[in-house]
Image: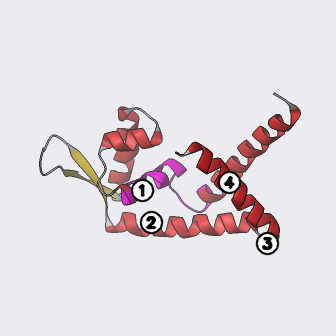
Amino acid sequence: MPKQEDATFTQMLSLGRLIRSQIERETTLSLAQLETLRFVYEAGRPSMLEVAHYHRITAPSATSLVDELVRAKLLTRVSDARDRRHVRLTLTSSGRRVLKASMESRKRVIESLLTDLGERDRKEFNRLIGNILAAHTK
């Protein structure tokens, strides 16, 4: 790998670790658990398989992840009205509160990490991230 690509790779990994560590300091839930709550909220009533696909993990791993959130009373399992063999996930009222607080916390973390950037650098940073996402999320 050329030196510039190596430096970019190392910096991206370091930035990811920094963001994760800052977010996880503000909650007792893991980043995977918080992302699961967000996914359930945004997807509506997803299945366990959809959670597994979202996280790119196996169905048994998704079940373990969801089991912890159900025990914490942040998610509930609901039988599908059309086929009771299928289970859908929904947020509880506690889950919605935790998710809202988490999203506010994430926003504060990101803002604090970018606080030293000037307006011009922030715009450039957002433009570059937007370019990366647009190229890889089609």
Q: Is residue 61 left or right of residue 106?
A: left
Residue 65: image x %, image y %?
A: 41, 43
Residue 88: image x %, image y %?
A: 25, 50
Q: Distance between the Cα atoms at labels 3 and 1?
A: 32 Å
- Disc nearer the start of the sequence (2/3): 2
Name the residue carrying label 3.
Answer: 119
> Within 10 angstroms of label 4, few (less than 14), some, or many (20 or more) residues?
few
- Disc nearer the start of the sequence (2/4): 2
- Disc nearer the start of the sequence (4/1): 1
The label number, if any, that marks residue 37 in the structure image:
1
- In the image, the segment drawn in magenta is 24-42
Q: Specify the amino acid type for callout 3.
A: Glu
Name the element at disc 2.
Answer: helix
Q: Specify the amino acid type for callout 1.
A: Leu
Which of these two is toward me, 88 or 129? 129
In the rendered image, the residue lying farthest to the right is 3
- Disc nearer the start of the sequence (4/3): 3
Whether residue 117 is visible = no
Q: Specify the amino acid type for callout 4.
A: Ile
Name the residue carrying label 4.
Answer: 129
Residue at 42% in and 70% down? 97
Whether residue 114 is visible = yes
